[in-house]
Amino acid sequence: MKNLDLVNIEKELKKRHPFPYLWFRKQNDNWDGWTNFIYQIQDWDALNERIASVVKNHKVDRQQLFQYAANRWYNFWSAQAIEKIFTQIQGIEAVHNIRDREKDFYLHEIPFDHKTSVFPRGFDHNFEFAQSNKRLLIEWLYKNQSTQKRYHLKNRLFIVVYDRKGEHWKLKAEISLIQQEIYKYVSSFRTEELQVFKFSENSQTCSDIIWVTNGR
């Protein structure tokens, strides 16, 4: 992550935008194994070359593998960029153990994982309601999170992206916009304003939402 250039990764991520965002299937071990090269490639053109190679070697459907790999790549590098934004801020301490799936950094000595989420279709209220009732959305996000590797009920900061035209996923590439909102949030951060939950009898979870919208 030290070598991640935020300006360049935003440019590369936006090269994903002309193509529809589809999955075709739930994530699984086979398709994850075929596409784990996404962790080593930041360049969009190089990504497509590797996709073509895997399609040829494994004789899988090109469109389906393209979508699977491109989506994993897009979400991973957006998350890496956002983590770098946080950890470049004075006073935030990065967690250096890459195997720690429950926290990415310490903010005011409080451990947090971060998670970028598009505004969910399944939430039974509109964006304006969610902004005024963020506790309800946070509960929904914890309850409906993926059961994949990063599932947990520990402290989490959610970056919720909302596009007025409905293409929420595209805002994950707006790294400079996300950076502005993170800076604003951290500069006015107050521990007492966190939302606190009791998901189990023996633990307490702190969470909050950083809203990112293009305002169109």
Image (spheres, rainbow, N blue to C red):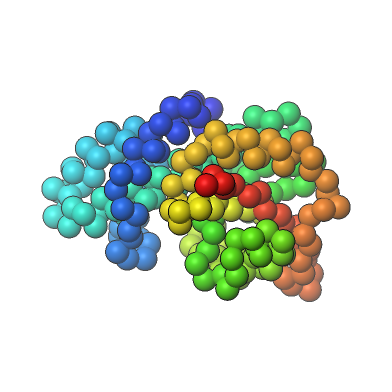
Q: Residue furthest right?
A: 192
Is residue 75 rendered to the left or right of residue 30?
A: right
Q: Quadrant of residue 76?
A: top left
Image coordinates of residue 146 in percent, x first then y, are 51, 64
Residue drawn at point x = 78 percent, y = 73 percent: 201
Question: In x, y percent, where is residue 102?
Answer: 63, 53
47 to 162, vertically: above or below: above
Q: Nearer the viewer, residue 100 or 81?
A: 81
User: Which residue is at 71% across, 54% downward?
Assistant: 208
Left or right: 193 in relation to 129: right
Q: Quadrant of residue 182?
A: top right
* Residue depicted at x 37% and y 66%: 26
Observer-nearest of 135 and 93: 135
- The residue located at (77%, 59%) in the rendering is 195
Placement of 10 over or under 185, stated as above or below:
above
Q: Is residue 174 visible?
A: yes
